[in-house]
Image: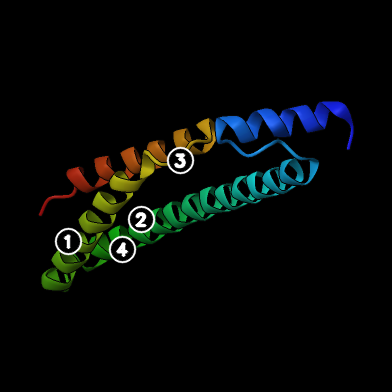
Amino acid sequence: MDRKAWQAGYKADREGTPPPTPLGTAAQFAAEERVRVEYAQSQAVLIKFLSVGLDLAFTMLRTAEMEDQSDPDHSRSALVQVRTALDTIRRFEGGVEDARASRDIRGRANELEAALNAFSW
């Protein structure tokens, strides 16, 4: 052990903090990297979830439009599901940190909301 490492360990021991070690630094770096990777993966999953939710909500809205005359009860049920999907999307859209993805999701959600509000219940 070189003198600097020994002094750092001695000082850390006196202060009650663990001494810096190359192994500790490597382990800490690996742990931080795992956190970054998992966070990026969770962001990707959130973006995919919201995108698929929007696709499904638009499909349900089209179903409601097609069923409006022939089956009004089914149409109203589809509209309730669209509203529920939109509320869920609005609740989670703020968690998207990528500016472009956030803008796209928010824009599609706004389109969905406008189409839903234009639909006469």
Q: Which residue is mark 3?
A: 96
Q: Secondary structure at mark 2?
A: helix
Which one is earlier in the sequence, the residue at label 1 or at label 4?
Answer: 4
Disc 2 marks a residue whose amino acid type is: Phe
Image coordinates for residue 72, horizontal then vertical, percent = 12, 69
Q: CA distance from mark 2 to mark 1?
A: 13 Å
Residue 60 image label: 4
Residue 80 image label: 1
Q: Secondary structure at mark 3?
A: loop
Q: CA distance from mark 4 to mark 2?
A: 5 Å
Looking at this rendering, what residue extends furthest in the right direction? 2
**Marks 1, 4: nearer the viewer:** 1
Q: Between residue 115 and residue 55, name the one nearer to us.
A: 55
Residue 58 image label: 2
* Label 2: few (<14), some (14–19) or many (≥20) C-alpha neighbours in 10 Å: many
Q: Marks 2 and 4: in contact by CB < 8 Å?
A: yes
Q: Between residue 120 and residue 40, name the one nearer to us.
A: 40
Q: CA distance from mark 1 to mark 4?
A: 10 Å
Q: CA distance from mark 2 to mark 3?
A: 20 Å
